[in-house]
């Protein structure tokens, strides 16, 4: 565990020292500020708009960061040969991968927590009311980020950064519509299409499960049962992706 | 993972059936047994044998030099020793363990060829990170990192980001990270690369200190003169095969190029006779130097000098250098066991 934490800490340091994080953080702050500027146009629904717009922006930014930094994280190690010195130390390859995952997740989670904090602060100051229900949505989005980060790590364990980013974006987009895909696949009448969509339904991450932003924007708290199920599902999905990534990475040759 | 003492530990000296040299020592810290690596071209799937049946063992405390031209298979062999690449056949044992077992690498130090480290860290941060990977306690790793950086001449650069390090400084940091865990086996891939003459002298000194402390060193190098000065034994690789292995004096003793016979007052008649027989005769100050290339001719020449009452001042064999031996071995693909 100590070695996993060392790799994770180093990954956080690497990502934080990249200017891209700063740019994204500034972009996040600007987004929240913009939602405040446009909220008067929402005709009395300003609090809802700021919360919804702010949380959605924070989620998109954190997800983008996870995908675009994560897709090159492993490749960079091999390409620049920094991995040779690290893997000659008494560390398991799966621990290295787990450390990379934990570091990237921690960084994106920090960004998400920071931006959600800004949203909460803005709503509290402007509307004299703190929407604590937002924390439920935050927890679900943190689990969603873990799933997305694990998928990035899985793809990056065997393919190039560009393909990793492409496959992950495709999986995230399809994962948000997994239920719809399943429904429409079953409506077409074709057994092949139904079979493919059925397979995709079970393979794809059901990311809609983690989206409670609209709900909390209306001031409705996430139900504990839904929260527990989503957290358990997300943890299992991320673990499965990481186990698959570890199995692939274990066989990988460093030329 | 349990310690394994398979065929390597039980093997004896002999010839590898595929032509490579076989040299086994039961108490070896590193043992390679018929180690082979075949890569396949991803497009044509045509196989390429990078390492071909290498069998070798290193005893504790020795410094072993792995020599060979580019593409000989040295770095691939080293990667298999470290568990970075998997053998196609054969096996590697690090102190009796498979190198893919992390425990096997606990007392291993490794310097990669043209090392590259995280450029977002400083030298001190990097060594602290490496110390954590080795499981060294915070106090010990801070103290060892400071000592090593001083020892390698980086004491003034501990807080400098690695992106600002020169090639020589990176090489020194590479040695520092390889020594941080006080290794029993040190694997150095081209340790002299990127170093100026002072740096090379310092590394030679450091390697001698490590040898004196009982560390086993495996180094691959192109710098043959320095390898000759540092190593107890060398192995020469060509085309993936270990074509020759032996102690440096042992390899070079079989290669006396000529003998120089220094004499006082050589009669002109005798000098002319020697020249006529094909020997080189030169006057050097008040002395004469006669150079003979054959052992039988030397005996004959010394006998005649004795009969003529010529005072023989000295007889010195001139041996080939490791570089000359290396070039001959590569040209002839000879297998000279020693």
Image (tube, coloured by chain):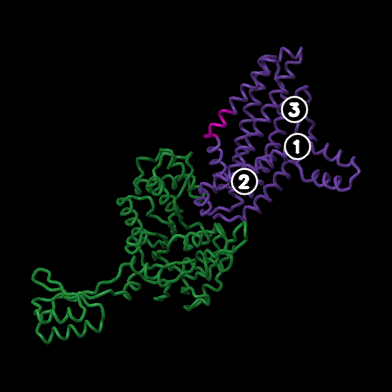
Chain colours: A purple, B green
- Residue in the picture at 67% in, 43% down: A150
With respect to residue B214, does B114 lie above or below?
above
Q: Which mark is residue A160?
A: 2
Residue at mark 3: chain? A
Magenta region, mostly helix, strand or loop? helix
Element type at mark 3:
helix
- Residue in the picture at 43% in, 42% down: B124
Neighbour tally class for label 2: few under 14, some 14-19, many 20 plus, Cα within 10 Å: some
Q: On the image, numbered disc 3 is attached to which residue?
A: A213
What is the magenta range? A16-23
Disc number lying in front (1 or 3): 1
Q: Quadrant of residue A108?
A: top right
Q: Is residue B199 left or right of residue B131?
A: left
Q: Tell me where residue A228 appears, x and y as whole percent.
A: 77, 37
Q: CA distance from mark 1 to mark 3?
A: 13 Å
Task: Indicate yes or no whether the magenta region holds residue A73.
Answer: no
């Amino acid at each position: 565990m100590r070695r996993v934490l060392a790799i994770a800490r180093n990954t956080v340091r690497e990502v934080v020292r990249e200017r891209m994080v700063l740019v994204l953080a500034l972009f996040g702050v600007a987004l929240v500020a913009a939602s405040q500027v446009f909220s008067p146009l929402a005709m009395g629904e300003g609090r809802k708009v700021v919360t919804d717009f702010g949380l959605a922006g924070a989620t998109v930014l954190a997800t983008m960061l996870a995908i675009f930094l994560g897709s090159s994280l492993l490749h960079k190690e091999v390409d620049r040969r920094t991995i040779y010195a690290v893997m000659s130390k008494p560390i398991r390859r799966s621990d290295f991968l787990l450390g990379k995952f934990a570091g990237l997740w921690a960084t994106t989670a920090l960004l998400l927590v920071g931006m959600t904090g800004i949203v909460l602060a803005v709503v509290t100051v402007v509307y004299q009311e703190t929407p604590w229900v937002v924390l439920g949505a935050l927890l679900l989005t943190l689990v969603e980020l873990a799933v997305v980060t694990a998928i990035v790590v899985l793809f990056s364990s065997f393919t190039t950064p560009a393909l990793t980013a492409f496959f992950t974006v495709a999986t995230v987009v399809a994962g948000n519509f997994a239920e719809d895909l399943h429904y429409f696949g079953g409506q077409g009448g074709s057994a092949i299409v139904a079979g493919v969509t059925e397979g995709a339904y079970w393979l794809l991450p059901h990311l809609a499960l983690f989206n409670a932003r609209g709900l909390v924007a209306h001031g409705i708290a996430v139900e504990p049962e839904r929260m527990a199920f989503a957290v358990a599902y997300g943890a299992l999905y991320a673990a499965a992706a990481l186990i698959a990534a570890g199995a692939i990475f274990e066989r990988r040759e460093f030329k | 993972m349990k310690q394994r003492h398979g065929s390597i530990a039980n093997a004896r000296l002999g010839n590898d059936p595929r032509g490579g040299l076989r040299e086994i020592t039961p108490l070896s810290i590193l043992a390679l047994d018929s180690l082979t690596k075949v890569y396949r071209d991803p497009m044509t799937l045509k196989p390429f044998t990078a390492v071909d049946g290498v069998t070798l063992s290193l005893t504790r405390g020795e410094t072993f030099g792995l020599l060979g031209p580019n593409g000989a298979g040295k770095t691939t062999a080293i990667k298999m020793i470290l568990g970075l690449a998997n053998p196609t056949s054969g096996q590697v044992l690090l102190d009796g363990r498979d190198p893919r077992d992390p425990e096997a690498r606990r007392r291993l130090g490794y310097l990669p060829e043209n090392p590259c480290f995280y450029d977002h860290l400083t030298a001190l941060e990097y060594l602290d990170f490496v110390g954590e990977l080795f499981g060294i306690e915070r106090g010990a790793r801070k103290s060892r990192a400071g000592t090593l950086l001083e020892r390698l001449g980086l004491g003034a650069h501990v807080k400098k980001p690695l992106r600002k390090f020169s090639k020589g400084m990176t090489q020194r940091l590479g040695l520092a990270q390889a020594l941080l865990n006080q290794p029993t086996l040190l694997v150095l891939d081209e340790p002299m690369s990127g170093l100026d003459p002072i740096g090379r002298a310092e590394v030679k000194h450091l390697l001698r200190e490590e040898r004196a402390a009982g560390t086993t060193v495996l180094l691959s190098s192109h710098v043959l003169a320095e390898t000759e000065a540092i190593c107890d034994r060398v192995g020469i690789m060509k085309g993936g095969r270990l074509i020759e292995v032996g102690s440096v004096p042992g390899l070079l003793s079989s290669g006396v190029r000529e003998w120089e016979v220094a004499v006082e007052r050589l009669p002109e008649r005798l000098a002319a006779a020697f020249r006529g027989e094909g020997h080189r005769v030169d006057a050097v100050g008040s002395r004469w130097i006669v150079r003979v290339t054959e052992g039988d001719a030397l005996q004959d020449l010394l006998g005649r000098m004795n009969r003529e009452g010529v005072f023989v001042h000295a007889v010195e064999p001139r041996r080939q250098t490791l570089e000359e031996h290396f070039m001959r071995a590569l040209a002839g693909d000879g297998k000279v066991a020693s």
